[in-house]
């Protein structure tokens, strides 16, 4: 539980941090450190240089930008969870942040950090996927936008380049979103055995658009494309939701782990797609 | 129902301000000048021959001062273990027998350097077949230890002391019951899984050798620092009085910090070799894989009884997992299950516990230690039997309890004399409690709402408060002190010249609140204010000889010794006060910081005035010896036998298998209570650990013997959010084996908990046809049970 030797810098500006990353290919960005430090202590990951972005000003805000809200790189889970803006316009993310880790982790870890870490069983990536979030990645060469659907590449692998910092996540406002999960100790505790997020827009009694995403069941947080296809265009009734539930793991490789067989996890994916959709649709009313 | 005794006051724990502000002193806080740090090279395999260990590259690394292997420490011998046991080499000697076994020891200037050098040691292995499955271990399909002919090291049977002929007669008698018309035989194979005891403070050892004085100081996060010090003395060849053992604050033990560990010998040995202080603090992963584990039974329990609830016999045949090696108490833990094997009941009981070695970490005491396992089996199968015959489990219990008239001194069907008990009274008190009534109403309401809801119940009896010292004759030994003894309690009480008091004890807390409880005992006896009483524990320099904190024994045994030492001091002080007040000794009473004459509160002397005389011996009445202190040794005539009744209400999510505990009622009886708040706290923590076993926790080894749960990411330890607010009540049946009438409460919560929860879940799922769900009842297992029941319906 002791990391290998590494260098540590804590730049005070974004430019300085990006410059350091540009000139040190072996560097790793740290915000709250709630995932990175345990991995380093277990020697599962040994970066040569840790670039701590915690002292950079201006990255700790949640802003209302009209059609979306923007959450900065240093916004803690507990801040995301308690934000009236997030609760009103991105309820799935507020729940996901509230059920991330334990109180200590939520007080220190960041929403953007959890997204960038891309854990297969983390909560907030599913919410970001369902809500159609956009990731803003900065490097010394400028910034680029990455759609959530393109962001989660594989287990613990995001689309971020080693020289990039996820400075902000932008969440389109949604009046109907929800996240639900089964935690490893039951209820909403701990990592997700399986969980699902849903975001729906209703127009004239019809689901005009929807996002549905899963966590905990495969190699990465992923869109449940079959469920999306099934629910869009319907009236969002229980019968329609059942159709989405039936297609929850379509195209998704479900993996077993200590907490569930593939059969059980596939079943849970359906259960939570159903619960998330039901709550999301109810919220639009 | 009463919750008070002469000592029954709620007093806030005096130790908490330091502990909750992070200002307590733990072993890892000890930092000595020039201190070196240790890391261990550990086996990646569960069973293998070690073909070579190349330490050259590690030796040459920056900061590395020494690398030791078995060749360096073989002369020290094996870790002490009991007869029939297989002891552990201090470092693996030619063979590794579980994943994580220490193969080499690095000593370096910093902890990080030591860890870096671990990666540089080249060890080669030839893998051997592994023994993981308990039935395969019992069948000797493969052997764990070359030269040990059977994996079964010992078989405990009950009734205790019955020879094979008697057991065969009992078998025939039970077969006779089974052949009777109109009897029901209910049998279940059930797992009581391996657990990882998780203390908030990992184990830590710091040793300092004072070469000029040939003295050793060893700090260890131990429940039994006296045994650590004496074992260091014996194995390193240092006189006992030249070794000082210190256990400062101990951050949780639960039994796992009780038996002696190899590092508790290796660290002092290295400190002497290098003539420099040395520290080792285990990592959280090492705490999971290399500190002992608990439980690990696979057993079949069988009840034979009539259709109207009269049980004729109970049988259990179980395989108990010892792990790769035996520590001090490893083989004795299942035997503790024999103590309570027949529970609170009067029917014929036959037990056979085959204790097998496996290629897993050693098992040893974990909160309850053998007793939660034994009570789990009997209470689960009693519940299954009640369900089978369609009777209320409480009614079945009432029919089969050992009757209250048999106490004190009832002999249990497994052959142990018990102190005091009134099981029907205790269960009736729970059934009559408003909390239990509310629980039944809530169950009916939830059920009518269509919820999957269950109410489960268990009663329990425990044997704890060890001594008596005659346990030695039953096969319990204690490696420390160089002799199989010291199964007693001790306490030293001194009133100082200023009227303050020091209490020095050999047992110490790992969360139990000794600082508060012992001050209460002495304050109650001497009338000295709590804040003038200093309690010192965990330092063998001062402490009287005793064996430590385990088996819910501190208050009952060492507390009794302190009580008796206080009484000796009081008797002497009464003689002095009588002389000063010109009154009769019999009329002297102690309260509010002094002594007064009964009925005349203003005829009074302060403790300082009494002490002044005691420390000026020429003023002592009747030429009595000066000083005002006393030491007492207490050896109880028997263990104590707490008991209780527990019920809980659960709901089950039929779609996910997720179990929620809606309500909990416990009616415990631990005899007289010294501090009700501390007793409640012990029950809270105890229940939580039982809930952890019932719902989530399991040390999982794969087929190759890899521990898959070697960290808190993969070992879902129970937390405060996983348990409801408990409704706790008590009945009071004082023991007759010690002067305070206290029985011990450290383990009762755990012993009563797990099967209560399983019984509740089975109650919820019974309408679907489910008869049993093995622990841990993780959602997927409960869901699977529902699916299987649906499929076979």
Image (cartoon, helix red, strand yellow):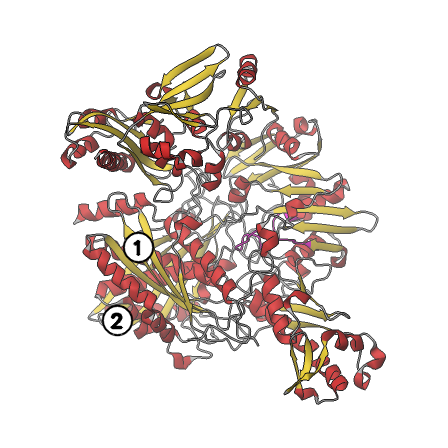
Q: Residue at x 28, y 71 (%)?
A: B395
Residue A14, compared with residue A130, is above or below; it is above
Could you tell me residue B82's position as x and y percent? 57, 57
- Camera sees residue B192: no
Could you tell me residue B330's position as x and y percent? 52, 55
Q: Which quadrant would the N terminus of chain B be assigned to in this image?
A: bottom left
Residue that label 2 marks: B309
Answer left or right for B469 relative to B571. left
Q: Which sits in the foreground, A198 or A6?
A: A198
Mark 2 → mark 1, Cα distance in angstroms: 26 Å
Q: Which sits in the foreground, B539 or B613?
A: B613
Q: Residue at x 60, y 57 (%)?
A: B15
Magenta span of residues = B246-264
| Magenta span includes B122 | no
Answer left or right for B609 relative to A204. right
Residue that label 1 marks: B650
Q: Which sits in the foreground, B749 or B141?
A: B749
């Amino acid at each position: 539980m002791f990391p290998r030797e590494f260098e540590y810098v804590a730049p005070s500006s974004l430019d300085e941090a990006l410059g350091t990353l540009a000139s040190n290919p072996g560097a790793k960005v740290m915000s709250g450190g709630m995932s990175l430090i345990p991995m380093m202590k277990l020697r599962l990951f040994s970066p040569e240089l840790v670039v701590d972005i915690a002292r950079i000003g201006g990255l700790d805000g949640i802003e209302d930008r009209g059609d979306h809200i923007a959450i900065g790189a240093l916004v803690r889970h507990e801040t995301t969870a308690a934000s009236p803006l997030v609760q009103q316009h991105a309820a799935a993310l507020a729940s996901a942040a509230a059920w991330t880790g334990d109180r200590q982790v939520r007080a220190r870890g960041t929403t953007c950090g959890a997204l960038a870490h891309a854990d297969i069983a983390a909560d907030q990536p599913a919410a970001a996927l369902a809500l159609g979030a956009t990731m803003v990645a900065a490097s010394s060469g400028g910034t680029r936008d990455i759609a959530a659907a393109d962001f989660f590449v594989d287990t613990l692998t995001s689309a971020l380049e080693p020289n990039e910092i996820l400075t902000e996540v932008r969440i389109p406002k949604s009046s109907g979103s929800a996240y639900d999960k089964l935690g490893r100790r039951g209820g909403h505790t701990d990592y997700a055995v399986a969980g699902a997020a849903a975001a729906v827009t209703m127009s004239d009694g019809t689901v005009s658009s929807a996002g549905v995403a899963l966590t905990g069941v495969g190699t990465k947080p992923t869109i449940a494309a079959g469920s999306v296809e099934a629910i869009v265009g319907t009236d969002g009734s229980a019968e329609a939701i059942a159709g989405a539930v039936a297609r929850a793991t379509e195209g998704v490789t479900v993996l077993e782990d200590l907490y569930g067989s593939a059969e059980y996890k596939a079943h849970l994916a359906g259960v939570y797609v159903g619960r998330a959709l039901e709550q999301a649709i109810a919220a639009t009313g | 129902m009463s919750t008070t005794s002469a000592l029954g006051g709620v007093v806030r724990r005096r130790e908490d301000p330091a502990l909750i502000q992070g200002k307590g002193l733990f072993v890892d806080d000890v930092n000595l000048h020039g201190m070196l740090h240790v890391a261990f090279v550990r086996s990646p395999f569960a069973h293998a021959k070690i073909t070579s260990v190349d330490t050259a590259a590690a030796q040459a690394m920056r900061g590395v001062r020494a690398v030791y292997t078995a060749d360096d420490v073989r002369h020290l011998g094996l870790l002490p273990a009991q007869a029939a046991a297989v002891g552990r080499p201090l470092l693996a000697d030619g063979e590794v027998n579980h994943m994580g076994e220490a193969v080499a020891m690095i000593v370096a200037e910093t902890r990080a350097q030591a860890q870096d050098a671990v990666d540089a040691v080249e060890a080669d292995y030839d893998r051997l077949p592994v023994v993981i499955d308990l039935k395969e271990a019992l069948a000797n399909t493969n052997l764990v230890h070359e030269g040990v002919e059977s994996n079964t090291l010992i078989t405990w049977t009950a009734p205790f002391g019955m020879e094979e002929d008697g057991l065969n007669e009992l078998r025939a008698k039970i077969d006779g019951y089974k052949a009777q018309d109109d009897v029901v035989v209910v049998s279940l194979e059930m797992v009581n899984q391996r657990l990882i005891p998780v203390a908030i403070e990992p184990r830590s050892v710091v040793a300092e050798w004072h070469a000029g004085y040939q003295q050793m100081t060893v700090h260890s996060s131990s429940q039994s620092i006296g045994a650590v010090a004496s074992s260091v003395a014996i194995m390193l060849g240092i006189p006992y009085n030249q070794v000082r053992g210190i256990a400062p604050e101990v951050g949780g033990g639960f039994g796992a910090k009780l038996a002696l560990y190899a590092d508790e010998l290796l660290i002092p040995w290295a400190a002497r070799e290098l003539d420099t202080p040395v520290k080792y603090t285990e990592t959280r992963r090492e705490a999971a894989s290399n500190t002992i584990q608990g439980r690990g039974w696979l057993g079949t329990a069988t009840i034979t009884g009539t259709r109207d609830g009269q049980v004729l016999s109970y049988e259990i045949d179980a395989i108990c997992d010892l792990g790769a090696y035996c520590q001090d108490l490893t083989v004795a833990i299942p035997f503790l299950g024999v103590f309570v094997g027949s529970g609170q009941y009067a029917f014929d009981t036959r037990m056979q516990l085959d204790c097998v070695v496996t290629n897993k970490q050693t098992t040893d005491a974990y909160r309850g230690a053998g007793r939660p396992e034994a009570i789990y089996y009997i209470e689960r199968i009693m519940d299954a039997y009640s369900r089978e015959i369609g009777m209320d489990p409480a009614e079945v219990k009432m029919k089969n309890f050992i009757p209250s008239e048999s106490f004190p001194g009832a002999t249990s069907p497994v052959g142990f004399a018990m102190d005091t008990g009134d099981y029907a009274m205790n269960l009736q008190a729970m059934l009559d409690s408003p909390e239990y009534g509310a629980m039944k109403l809530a169950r009916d309401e939830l059920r009518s709402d269509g919820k999957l809801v269950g109410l489960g119940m268990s009663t329990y009896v425990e044997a704890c408060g060890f001594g008596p010292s005659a346990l030695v004759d039953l096969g319990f030994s204690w490696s420390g002190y160089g002799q199989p003894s010291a199964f007693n309690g001790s306490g030293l009480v001194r009133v100082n010249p200023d009227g303050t008091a020091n209490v020095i004890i050999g047992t110490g807390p790992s969360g139990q609140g000794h600082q508060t409880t012992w001050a209460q005992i002495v304050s109650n006896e001497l009338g000295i204010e709590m804040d003038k009483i200093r309690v010192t524990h965990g330092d063998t320099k001062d402490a009287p000889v005793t064996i430590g904190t385990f088996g819910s024994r501190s208050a009952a045994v060492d507390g009794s010794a302190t009580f008796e030492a206080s009484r000796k001091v009081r008797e002497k002080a009464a003689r002095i006060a009588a002389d000063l007040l010109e009154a009769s000794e019999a009329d002297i009473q102690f309260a509010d910081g002094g002594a007064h004459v009964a009925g005349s509160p203003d005829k009074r002397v302060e403790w300082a005035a009494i002490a002044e005389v005691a420390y000026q011996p020429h003023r002592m009445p009747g030429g009595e010896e000066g000083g005002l202190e006393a030491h007492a040794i207490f050896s109880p005539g028997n263990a104590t036998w707490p008991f209780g009744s527990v019920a809980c209400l659960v709901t089950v999510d039929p779609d996910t298998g997720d179990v929620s505990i809606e309500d909990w009622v416990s009616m415990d009886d631990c005899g007289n209570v010294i501090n009700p708040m501390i007793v409640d706290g012990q029950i809270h923590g105890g229940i939580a650990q039982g809930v952890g076993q019932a719902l989530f926790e399991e040390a999982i080894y794969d087929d190759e013997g890899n521990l898959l749960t070697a960290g808190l990411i993969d070992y879902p330890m129970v937390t405060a959010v996983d348990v409801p607010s408990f409704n706790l009540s008590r009945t009071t049946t004082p023991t007759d084996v010690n002067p305070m009438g206290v029985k011990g409460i450290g383990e009762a919560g755990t012993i009563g908990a797990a099967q209560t929860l399983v019984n509740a879940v089975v109650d919820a799922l019974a309408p679907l046809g489910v008869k049993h769900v093995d622990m841990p009842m993780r959602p997927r297992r409960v869901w699977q049970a529902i699916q299987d029941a649906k499929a076979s319906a």
